[in-house]
Amino acid sequence: MPASVALPSAEAACLQLLRTGIGRPTTIALRCSHGVERIGRALATLSDLRLTEKGKDGVWGLTARGRTMSFSVLAEGKTRGRKPSRTAVPGSTVARLLALLETPRHRADLPALLGVTRERVRQLVVSQSAAGRIRGAGSKDPIFALALTGDPVVLLTYAQERVLSAFAEETPTTLSRLARVAHRPPTVMAQIADFLRDVGLIDEAGRATHGVLWRLTPAGRSHWQRSPDVAEAEEPPLMFRSGRIANVLAYLEEQGKARTVDVARALDIPPQSMNALMQYLKRRGIVRVRSDAFRSPYVLTDEGRELLAAMTRRSDAA
């Protein structure tokens, strides 16, 4: 039994990737920039050499010999004839695929648009991704959303798309409510929210009783992957529902600043009750004193303005 074996580049690349735990032919093809057919032949060759074996699930693995056998890469010989074209032949299925992806699309839509089987689309996508012409979402294996490599559009995975689609058009919500609608555990939900925020599709919208509020940005509302078919997460309950509190916040918003006595007089609230209410709103971060000066007027905080907006919005919708 030889202590070493010389392998063509594709076979050597397959063996190296198998040793890192990658065993799916499609993923191997993408990682080493070879077509699926070439990788299939390479895996068969390695199997004949008793270096690899195919599992029942279609995933390839190493034999004991394959895990320990040292190998070298054969020098690439010169080939006769014309070299393969680096551009798509006009009218070919590849050219039609690239033309379709001038607009980003879901991979599942391509068989019907191209008039070919899903397996043929898989082969095309793998080969064109390996050639650097198209890209996928969140992975080197483009299995969901696709675009041309030069297109700067943000591509989302299935889970990210589902979360984005769970946002209502205008109203903010919490991650816990989004997680329930999108069926994602809290840790995954937090990672998705961080990604969507980093790419500018959502942002924070203040705080509610049950946590941070999130909302769509204009880019998020218009993103091509936002689906109307996903149930929307509801806006969480308001921190307060009191009409008196709504009137106090509205007065402060209108005036910009006001002392407790002025608010009490304007809204016909007993001074003692008004003072207790302002202290309570201050503890909850809804209002704050403008300065440390004695009898400094109160102003709304950012949380107070968000709360007033939510109370006004719900009142108008009622």
Image (cartoon, rainbow, N blue to C red):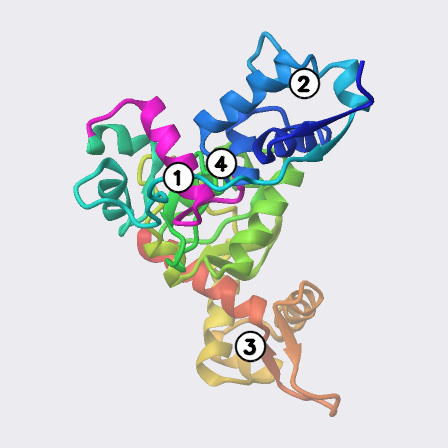
Give the residue displayed 21% in from the left and 38% down from the top. Answer: 92
Give the residue displayed 48% in from the left and 61% down from the top. Answer: 200
Task: Using the image, tell me which numbered label, if any, was put on residue 61.
Answer: 2
Q: CA distance from mark 2 to mark 4?
A: 19 Å
Q: CA distance from mark 2 to mark 1?
A: 34 Å
Task: Using the image, tell me which numbered label, if any, was put on residue 34.
Answer: 4
Q: Is residue 94 visible in the rendered structure shown here?
A: yes
Q: Is residue 207 above or below residue 253?
A: above
Instruction: Please give the range of residues in magenta.
Output: 115-141
Please, what is the three-letter code of the amino acid marked with disc 1? Arg
Is label 1 in a helix, a strand or a loop?
loop
Please, what is the three-letter code of the amino acid marked with disc 4? His
Q: State which tag comes first along the sequence, 3 or 4.
A: 4
Q: Residue lying farthest left?
A: 91
Frontmost of labels 2 and 3 is 2
Query: Residues at badges 2 and 4 in contact (C-beta under 8 Å)?
Result: no
